[in-house]
Amino acid sequence: MKKHIPNFLTCANLFSGCIGIVFAFQGELQTAAYFVVLSGIFDFFDGFAARLLHVKSEIGKELDSLADMVSFGFLPGVVMYSLLQQSDCGWTYLPYLGFLITVFSALRLAKFNIDTRQTEEFIGLNTPMNTLFIVSLPFIRQDHPELIRSAVLLSGITLLMSWLLVSEIRIFSLKFNSLAWGQNKFKFIFLILSAVLAAFLKFAAIPVILVLYISLSIIHFRTIR
């Protein structure tokens, strides 16, 4: 029975992502964001359960990538497509640019599966963090409507995030092999600051958290050279 628990959690990730996509296509982007968070929780615990129960499998690895492609690949592409549709864009076909997020997420996931350098860290921005950033934009639009309705800005964000997904920037993973401060200080600093930011700003904090994540990762890997 226990060998099926991680795959059940992965399927729950996929199911949540599918529901989020439905809401995104209906223009309910903030509701879709909550299903992204739910998918992220399931995505974290499926790997945690597999390690805890010692039931890692090849099918689990493949299923995880397929679920992530939906929840953290297709879903953010749909959100960006919807945002571009609602922007000040005057070109009918520009919203389709949003699906570059989906394409580069697929490349990111495929690269992760075969890149032996990514056992303890990420090379390029991971898809869940990218997705959280994309789904934070509808919340930011509440306070800065003109900013997030700019087709130029949204197009620039799409291109930037697509590049970050397949870049060679080293990003630390939030997996802990120990709780020693010296070994994990940048991870602890990131988690503490992120929690404080999220408590005050909620989804609007995510762009700041993203910059913090990349910046601390760069500093971390420079200090261990």
Image (spheres, rainbow, N blue to C red):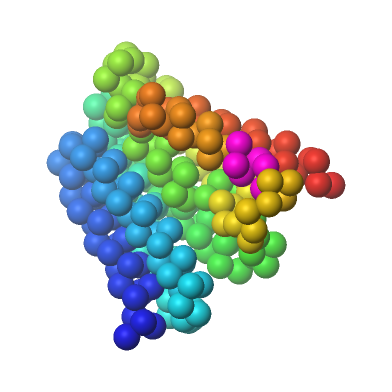
Residue placed farthest to the left in the image? 26
Name the spot of residue 28 as percent of width and height, x first: 18, 37
User: Count the marks: how many?
Assistant: 0
Query: Horizontally, is 9 left or right of 156 in the view?
Result: left
Viewer-closest of 71 and 45: 45
Instruction: Answer with the quarter of the image where residue 187 lies.
Output: top right
Viewer-closest of 122 and 102: 122
Check the image and report above or below for 144 versus 83: above
Residue placed farthest to the front in the image? 180
Q: Is residue 188 magenta?
A: yes
Which SS type dominates the magenta stretch? helix
Name the spot of residue 73 as percent of width and height, x first: 39, 52
Residue drawn at (52%, 50%), measured in percent from left and top?
126
Query: Horizontally, is 2 left or right of 112 in the view?
Result: left
Check the image and report above or below for 13 versus 40: below
Q: Which residues are magenta?
A: 184-189
Asked if residue 59 shows in the view, the reply is yes
Residue drawn at (26%, 48%), measured in percent from left and top?
35
Residue placed farthest to the bottom in the image? 1
Asked if residue 91 shows in the view, the reply is no
Q: Is residue 17 magenta?
A: no
Residue drawn at (56%, 51%), measured in percent from left and top?
174
Check the image and report above or below for 83 versus 22: above
Residue drawn at (58%, 32%), measured in percent from left and top?
212
Quadrant where the N terminus is found in the figure? bottom left
Viewer-closest of 14 and 45: 45
Name the spot of residue 144 as percent of width and height, x first: 33, 15
Name the spot of residue 81 as percent of width and height, x first: 30, 38
